[in-house]
Amino acid sequence: MAAKFELTALSRIAKLGSDTAITGTLIACAYIGAGGLEQPLDVVAAVDLEPTVDAYFVIFRFVPATSTVGFAQEGVGRGTARLVNFNPNDVDTDVVLNLFIQLSNAKQDGIDLRVGDRCRTEVSAAIRFKGIIHPVAGSVSNLNSTFEIPRFSGCGQAEDLDPLFTGLITGPDNDIRTTLRSLGPP
């Protein structure tokens, strides 16, 4: 069983108190194991997310900043799914996607910070998709979760900006509200 979804999300960066819009697609495949539908299905998932250009943040509550925020998936997402009351239109899903968060074109008050092209989290952030998903084409599913943003590495051409981005962004309790609109089988 496989489904493709149009993904839109709004992520609230806790330390900055700012929102970032995310768009892209998600493809998920569920596999029936030896236990049949009585057991949880194994799920693999992949995302293709568009970079968020000119994401707007306010640092220290008064300094405007913009950046392009990109995402690179590490491996495939893995998890489980179970049909709710054996209904294939309602699937209770628990999948974790590991995403590196990348920063580029960062500007503080219009001044280019020259972050370079290798600025990203040291390790991937684990984003959990847990809840009821409706895979029938045209159906909409809403999922909410929190995640931790790891430390940043590789930031800065003229000077090391890793401590700056780590101090401003890294931390727990970042919210993500995701809407998945099913496009049917991939």
Image: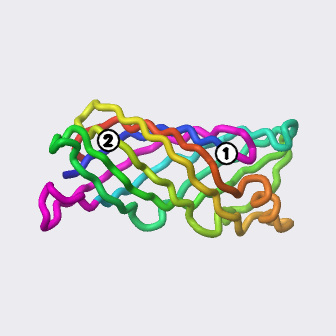
Q: Residue at x 33, y 50 (%)?
A: 93
Q: Residue at x 79, y 47 (%)?
A: 107
Residue, x 56% and y 48% (percent of image)?
A: 146
Mark on residue 39? none
- Is 32 one of the magenta-colored residues? yes
**Residues in magenta?**
13-42
Closer to the N terminus: mark 1 or mark 2? 1
Image location of residue 138, percent across then percent down: 28, 30
Q: Looking at the image, is 182 positioned above or below residue 96?
A: above
Q: What's the residue at 78%, 53% (across, down)?
A: 168
The quadrant where residue 14 appears = top right
> Which numbered circle lies on residue 13?
1
Q: Which of the 4 image quarters holds residue 85?
A: top left
Q: Is residue 37 left or right of residue 180?
A: left
Q: Position of residue 166 (x, y in %)?
A: 75, 60
Is 132 located above or below residue 71 in the figure? Answer: above
| Amino acid of disc 2 | Ile
Task: Give, as a three-letter code, the residue at label 1.
Answer: Ile
Q: CA distance from mark 1 to mark 2?
A: 25 Å
Quarter residue 41 falls in: bottom left
Element marked by disc 2 = strand
- Taking the image as shown, residue 24 lies to the left or right of residue 92, namely right
Q: Which residue is mark 2?
A: 133
Give the x, y percent position of residue 133: 32, 41
